[in-house]
Image: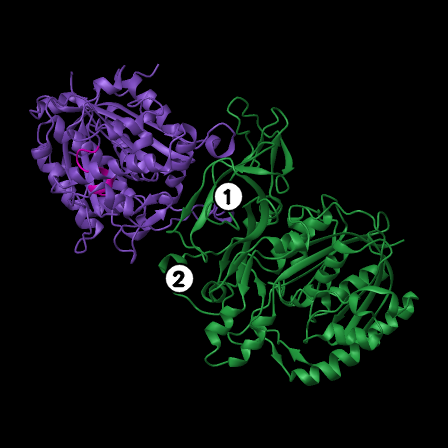
């Protein structure tokens, strides 16, 4: 019987670059920058790293395939390096590889690094990725905003909301994240915005306007993980540890079977339930101190509050408008700005979320530090609501 | 008794108000004023002669099957890949169907009909046309896009075939070379006097004689509007009563080339009374003349599209030139870098999945009854998951409803925004589909839909086009 990952692995060093339009830096520069911060933080040396996982989702735009780009950039001593890709959840996937390797006893110290260099495409927004030989012959040519926009109308129909009310709640999500991003020196978008500006923005994919969409950024983030024993040996007191790390992947049921109404993300509910069980969380709304969720679009964050059991079904609009998830609310969401404003270099995002929890748990979050941070959640979603990869991680301190 | 047993038409939803042409080109071509009346139809970016033929054919078949399909057109998308074969596959007629493209002349539609009727071939004859025209040319104003289809057979005949003739005369009033996009033509007055008014009466008289009927008894005279008032003049010379001259549909659709005489014939069948005599003439390097007598047998078909009057009742009228020029390829637009995505089609995959892609064939699980798309090795029902238990089920003719939708301004689409979402078939099964023929306000969760066969993507690098099915809103009163 599996016993889970809870407190079997400690995070002893993390790094994250400034996200944004890093015109002067390539993916290699970003990887080196994130890694240097993490390595210094950990007190370890490169020779101590015994295995590594590299996360990228659009590698054709920058480093190319395989684990080799990470190994060559950091001059890793011919250790196993694996490149992973699971859409926008790739960063968490890399962490999962590293954490499982340590938990399994296969190695003592492992590295997870995610990177994306998206601003070499020549145009704004995410590029369309290849989607498979047969899929391309019948799937509509959908984009990320177009696929997540589908959530909005379905959610509205299910809960009998007016378009105006839903748009207002979505706007509040973005206004909140911009306010948070403004206080984060590593964030891509650092300008506060108003609700009216969100509502007046040009339409990208109905009903998502420009400010309902997250930034497309360059950046990298990484984590060095090890055993609790080694962490203690390094002098880490109250070290950050992984309490749960779960992944749920669509099996075609949402897209092919008649049950799903399009108003929520089915995998998120499964991944959250498994993560809460693994971490021993009974009442997430009370027990969690803060969350970093995959707010690729404002409506995604809104719906995710219900999928994670943080708002009652149909209640997210009220909770959002009541400020529950604001920086000074009961359960802040994206206190670092989130995908919306910290930015979304795809392969790095899952690790960036953990990075913020890591800082908050260690009391290192500067002006945005929350008091009494005990347990945080990251939610990393890749693909489209109708077919996706969803990971949920719960991060706390060793022994707490 | 052998004749026409069913008919269907398709007129693209998009119409151009011809005043837009005068507004656009009047500075250099003031003569367009004479043509700046009424509307012409034009194909959307995802329609072509093949997709329009499928739409018309579905109306004519009305759920029946046939063993022969002839597709007539001078604007077929493929010169070497049988276009009728794509139509037959989209219609789900199976590989036993005999298919043929008829092309090379504006009378290809009537010629295909005549050959099938003379040979008493029970099958489908469909004509479709979507011709490109040069900006500011008279053709840009005169032409229109449309399709018409007929099923032929011996039982439940709507119009009995009484006789017909075909004259072949290499009269080159206009031509279009194989590799050319546009027509080149000679002076109208010569075309009228030496062409239409010389050749049409010869063919018509001969056909009436073969059918053993008198010109004075013709109740519906069909001649495409290739020249101004040509049908009325020809009728006068033939002794056909003026009241029998059919509306050329030129002010509402335009001249749809090889499809036009068939389109007018479908219109006549829509309105004919029992016993009405119908004379249909197609002109183009000679002429075909066909004589029918309407039986009064009721026709309940025409599928989701209705007849011509229903088709004409719907539609979106463009009063500006921009959309027409862009969608018909008359101007080269800046389409942005997203349009650069490589769209090579792996032909092996297309072939392996031809039933799925062209016929919208999914699977029905024999173990639990769940309908699903695509058909898969393992049933999608989480309470079943049976292996290798699925039989084919065609979803193309089933009504569906909107589950989710959006209007996407980011993705590349020749006519943005791109509408797409998840749809649910009423009898089970769902599909992530593109929406076609959408106007703002058409889509909402639960809105009714019908499936239409359309171009999915153009691959300009390789001159290929992908076809697939899309979901179109069902509107009250026409398209």
According to the image, label 2 marks what residue? B335
Label 2 SS: loop
Please tell me how crowded label 2 is: few (under 14), some (14-19), or many (20+) other residues with Cα within 10 Å. few
Q: Quadrant of residue B389?
A: top right
Q: Chain coloured purple: which letter?
A: A
Side (left or right) of B259 relative to A89: right
Q: Residue furthest front?
A: B243
Residue occupying the point 67% across, 54% down: B309
Residue B52 visible somewhere in the drawing = yes
Mark 1 / mark 2, whichever is N-terminal = 2
Chain for disc number 1:
B
Rendered location of residue A226, percent (x, y): 18, 27
Does the magenta segment cover residue B45? no
Residue A53 visible somewhere in the drawing = no
Please tell me how crowded label 1 is: few (under 14), some (14-19), or many (20+) other residues with Cα within 10 Å. many
Q: Chain coloured green: which letter?
A: B
Its colouring scheme is by chain
Q: Quadrant of the C terminus of chain A?
A: top left
Residue B433 — which label?
1
Rendered location of residue B79, percent (x, y): 62, 66
Chain for disc number 2:
B
B30 or B421: nearer the viewer: B30
- The residues colored magenta run A334-343
Side (left or right) of A128 relative to B123: left
Q: Is residue B159 above or below residue B404?
A: below
Label 1 SS: strand
Q: Is residue A323 above or below residue A65?
A: above
């Amino acid at each position: 019987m599996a016993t889970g990952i809870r407190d079997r692995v400690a995070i002893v060093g993390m790094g994250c670059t400034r996200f944004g339009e890093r015109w002067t830096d390539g993916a290699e520069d970003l990887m080196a920058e994130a890694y240097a911060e993490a390595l210094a933080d950990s007190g370890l040396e490169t020779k101590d790293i015994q295995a590594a996982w590299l996360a990228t989702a659009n590698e054709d735009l920058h480093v190319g395939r395989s684990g080799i780009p990470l190994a060559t950039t950091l001059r890793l001593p011919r250790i196993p390096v694996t490149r992973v890709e699971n859409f926008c959840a790739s960063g968490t996937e890399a962490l999962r590889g590293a954490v499982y390797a340590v938990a399994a006893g296969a190695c003592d110290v492992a590295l997870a690094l995610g990177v994306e260099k998206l601003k070499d495409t020549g145009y704004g927004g995410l590029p369309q990725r290849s989607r498979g030989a047969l899929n391309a012959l019948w799937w509509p040519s959908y984009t990320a905003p177009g696929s997540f926009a589908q959530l909005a109308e379905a959610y509205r129909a299910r809960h009998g909301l007016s378009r105006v009310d839903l748009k207002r709640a979505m706007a509040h999500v973005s206004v909140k994240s911009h306010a948070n991003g403004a206080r984060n020196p590593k964030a891509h978008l650092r300008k506060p915005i108003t609700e009216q500006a969100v509502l007046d923005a040009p339409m990208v994919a109905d009903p998502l306007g420009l400010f309902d969409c997250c930034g497309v950024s360059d950046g990298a983030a990484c984590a060095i993980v090890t055993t609790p024993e080694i962490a203690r040996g390094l002098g880490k007191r109250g070290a950050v540890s992984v309490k749960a790390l779960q992944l749920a992947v669509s099996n075609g049921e949402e897209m092919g079977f008649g049950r799903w109404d399009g108003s929520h993300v089915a995998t998120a509910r499964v991944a959250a339930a498994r993560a809460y069980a693994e971490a021993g969380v009974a009442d997430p709304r009370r027990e969690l101190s803060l969350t970093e969720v995959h707010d690729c679009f404002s409506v995604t964050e809104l719906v995710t509050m219900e999928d994670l059991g943080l708002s009652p079904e149909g209640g997210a609009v009220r909770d959002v408008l009541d400020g529950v998830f604001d920086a000074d609310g009961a359960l802040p969401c994206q206190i670092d700005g989130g995908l919306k404003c910290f930015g979304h270099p795809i392969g790095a995002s899952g690790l960036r979320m953990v990075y913020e929890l890591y800082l908050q748990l260690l009391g290192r979050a500067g002006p945005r530090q929350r008091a009494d941070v005990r347990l945080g959640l990251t939610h990393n979603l890749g693909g489209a609501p109708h077919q996706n990869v969803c990971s949920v991680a719960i991060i706390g301190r060793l022994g707490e | 008794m052998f004749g026409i047993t069913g008919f269907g038409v398709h007129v693209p939803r998009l119409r151009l108000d011809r005043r837009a042409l005068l507004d656009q080109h009047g500075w250099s071509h003031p003569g367009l004023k004479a043509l700046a009346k009424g509307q012409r139809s034009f194909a959307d970016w995802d329609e072509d002669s093949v997709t329009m033929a499928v739409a018309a054919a579905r109306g004519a078949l009305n759920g029946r099957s046939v063993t022969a399909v002839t597709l007539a057109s001078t604007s077929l998308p493929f010169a070497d890949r049988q276009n009728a074969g794509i139509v037959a596959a989209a219609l789900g007629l199976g590989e036993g169907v005999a298919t043929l493209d008829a092309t090379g002349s504006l009378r290809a539609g009537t010629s295909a009909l005549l050959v099938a009727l003379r040979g008493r071939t029970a099958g489908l004859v469909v004509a479709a046309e979507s011709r490109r025209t040069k900006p500011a040319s008279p053709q840009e104003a005169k032409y229109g896009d449309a399709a018409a289809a007929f099923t032929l057979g011996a039982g439940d005949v709507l119009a009995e075939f009484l006789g017909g003739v075909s004259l072949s005369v290499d009269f080159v009033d206009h031509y279009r070379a194989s590799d050319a996009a546009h027509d080149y033509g000679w002076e109208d007055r010569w075309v009228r006097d030496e062409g239409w008014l010389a050749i049409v009466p010869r063919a018509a008289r001969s056909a009436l004689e073969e059918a053993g009927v008198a010109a004075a008894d013709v109740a519906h005279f069909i001649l495409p509007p290739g020249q101004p008032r040509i049908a009325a003049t020809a009728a006068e010379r033939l002794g056909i009563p003026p009241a029998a001259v059919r509306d050329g549909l030129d002010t509402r659709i335009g001249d749809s080339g090889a499809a036009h005489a068939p389109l007018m014939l479908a219109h006549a069948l829509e309105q004919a009374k029992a016993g009405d005599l119908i004379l249909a003439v197609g002109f183009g390097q000679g002429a075909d003349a066909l004589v029918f007598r309407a039986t009064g047998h009721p026709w309940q078909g025409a599928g989701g599209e209705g007849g011509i009057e229903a088709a004409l009742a719907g539609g979106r009228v463009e009063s500006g030139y921009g959309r027409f020029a862009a969608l018909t390829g008359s101007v080269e637009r800046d389409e942005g870098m997203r349009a650069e995505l490589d769209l090579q089609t792996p032909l092996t995959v297309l072939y392996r999945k031809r039933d799925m892609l062209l016929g919208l064939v999914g699977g029905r699980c024999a173990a639990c009854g769940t309908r699903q798309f695509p058909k898969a090795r393992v049933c999608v029902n989480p309470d079943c998951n049976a292996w290798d238990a699925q039989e084919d089920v065609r979803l193309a003719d089933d009504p569906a409803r909107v589950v989710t939708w959006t209007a996407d301004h980011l993705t590349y689409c020749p006519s943005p925004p791109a509408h797409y979402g998840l749809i649910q078939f009423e009898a089970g099964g769902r599909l992530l589909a593109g929406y076609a023929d959408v106007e703002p306000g058409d889509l909402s969760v639960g809105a009714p839909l019908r499936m239409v066969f359309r171009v999915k993507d153009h691959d300009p690098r390789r001159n290929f086009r992908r076809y697939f099915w899309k979901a179109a809103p069902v509107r009250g009163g026409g398209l």
